[in-house]
Image (cartoon, rainbow, N blue to C red):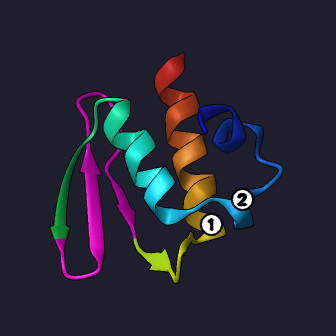
């Protein structure tokens, strides 16, 4: 899943649950308030996600990718 998110070729085909699981696996903590899933991790920007049905919103997948790439440097 990490390679798929970082690859950037299928942002519209990432399942919301898979993206949330990936962030949790990478050490982010999650707080859910209504439909907002807020992910936090020291040294990284906060990530706020909402699902678009069963899939993650493509622009949010892009934001996650940018945050993860900044965190790896």
Q: Quadrant of the C terminus?
A: top right
Considering the numbered disc 1 on the image, is that residue within a helix, a strand or a loop?
helix
In the rendered structure, find residue 11 and report the number of the disc placed on it: 2
**Where in the figure is residue 11, as x and y percent of width and height?**
71, 59
Circle nearer the N terminus (2, 1) = 2
The secondary structure type at the circle numbered 2 is: helix
2 in relation to 56, above or below: above
Q: Which quadrant holds residue 42?
A: top left
Query: Which part of the image, by quadrant, shows the N terminus?
Result: top right
The crowd level at tag 2 (other Cα within 10 Å; few <14, some 14-19, many 20+) is many
Look at the picture and state if 67 lies above or below 59. above
Separation (CA) of disc 2 from disc 1: 8 Å
Tell me if label 2 and label 1 are in contact, CB under 8 Å.
Answer: yes
Q: Residue at x 35, y 33 (%)?
A: 25
67 vs 71: above or below: below
* Magenta-span inclusion, residue 28: no
Q: Is residue 8 left or right of residue 41?
A: right
The residue carrying pointer 1 sits among few (fewer than 14), some (14 to 19) or many (20 or more) residues within 10 Å by Cα, namely few
Q: Which residues are magenta?
A: 33-49
- Percent x, y for residue 4? 70, 41
Front one among 57 and 44: 57
Q: Residue at x 58, y 72 (%)?
A: 57
Residue 62 lies in what quarter of the image?
A: bottom right
- In the picture provided, is 3 more to the left or to the right than 57? right
Relative height, residue 27 to residue 45 (above, below):
above
Residue under numbered circle 1: 59
């Amino acid at each position: 899943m990490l390679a798929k998110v970082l690859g950037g070729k299928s942002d519209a085909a990432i399942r919301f649950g898979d993206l949330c699981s990936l962030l949790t696996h990478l050490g982010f903590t999650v707080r859910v308030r209504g439909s907002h899933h807020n992910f936090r991790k020291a040294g990284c920007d906060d990530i706020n996600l909402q699902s678009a049905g069963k899939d993650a919103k493509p622009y949010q997948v892009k934001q996650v990718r940018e945050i993860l790439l900044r965190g790896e440097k």
